[in-house]
Each structure stands twice: as C-alpha cells, then as structure tokens.
Image: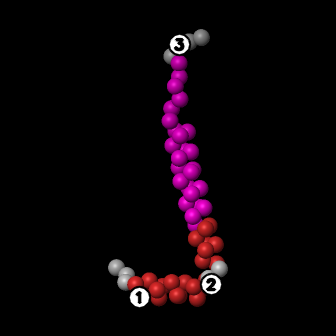
C-alpha cells in the first residue's frame, strides 16, 4: 500500500491545493453528510417494520 513518505506527500499536495483552513471544513461537512445518511437509514428501517393490527372486527 502506501508508506509514510507517500502519505506525507499526499497531505502536502492537499494542503497546497485547498489550504489549511478549508480541509477541516470539508471533513466536517463530509462527516455531517455521513451522519445524516446513517440517521435516514435508521429512520427508514424503523418505518418499514409492520405495525401490529388487531384481527378482531369492531
């Protein structure tokens, strides 16, 4: 895979391309997006469970 030198080179290129202040904001936005996606999956699985229905007619 990648060694330490390659990771440092990739990090340096990313800092040069995006700047040191923009990278944390991008990571924060990505984390919030993933969290919202997981919450939506949990909400969808909860709504797909069938509700108990009484068989007795009123």
Q: Which of marks 2 and 3 is nearer the N terminus?
A: 2
Question: Secondary structure under badge 3?
Answer: loop
Query: How far apart are the alpha carbons under marks 1 and 3?
Result: 71 Å
Q: In this view, does 50 lie above or below 10?
A: above
* Prevailing SS of the magenta stretch: helix
- Locate the C terminus and report the quarter of the image it occupies: top right
Camera-side residue of 25 and 53: 25
On screen, 21 above or below 16?
above
Of helix, strand and loop, which one carries label 2? loop
Q: Which mark is first along the chain, 3 or 1?
A: 1
Q: Residue furthest top?
A: 58
In the displayed image of the protein, which residue is found farthest to the front?
A: 4
Q: Which residue is drawn at 55% across and 60% down?
A: 34
> Magenta region: which residues?
30-54
Which quarter of the rendered picture does the N terminus lie within? Answer: bottom left
**Residue 28 is drawn in which quadrant?**
bottom right
**Which residue is painted at 58% across and 88% down in the image?**
16
Helix, strand or loop at label 1? It is helix
Front position among marks 1 and 3: 1
Residue that label 3 marks: 56
Q: Where is residue 37 in the image (x, y as percent from the top left)?
A: 56, 56
- At 64% across and 72% down in the image, what residue appears? 25
**Which residue bears the numbered disc 1?**
5
Residue for point 53% across, 40% down: 46
User: Looking at the image, is 58 positioned above or below residue 8?
Assistant: above
Q: Which of marks 2 and 1 is nearer the N terminus?
A: 1
Check if residue 49 falls in the magenta segment: yes
Question: Whole-percent x and y of residue 52?
Answer: 52, 25
Residue identifier under label 2: 19
């Amino acid at each position: 895979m990648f060694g330490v030198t390659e990771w440092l080179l990739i990090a340096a290129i990313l800092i040069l391309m995006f700047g040191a202040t923009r990278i944390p904001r991008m990571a924060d936005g990505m984390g919030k997006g993933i969290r919202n996606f997981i919450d939506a999956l949990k909400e969808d699985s909860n709504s797909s469970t069938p509700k108990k229905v009484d068989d007795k007619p009123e």
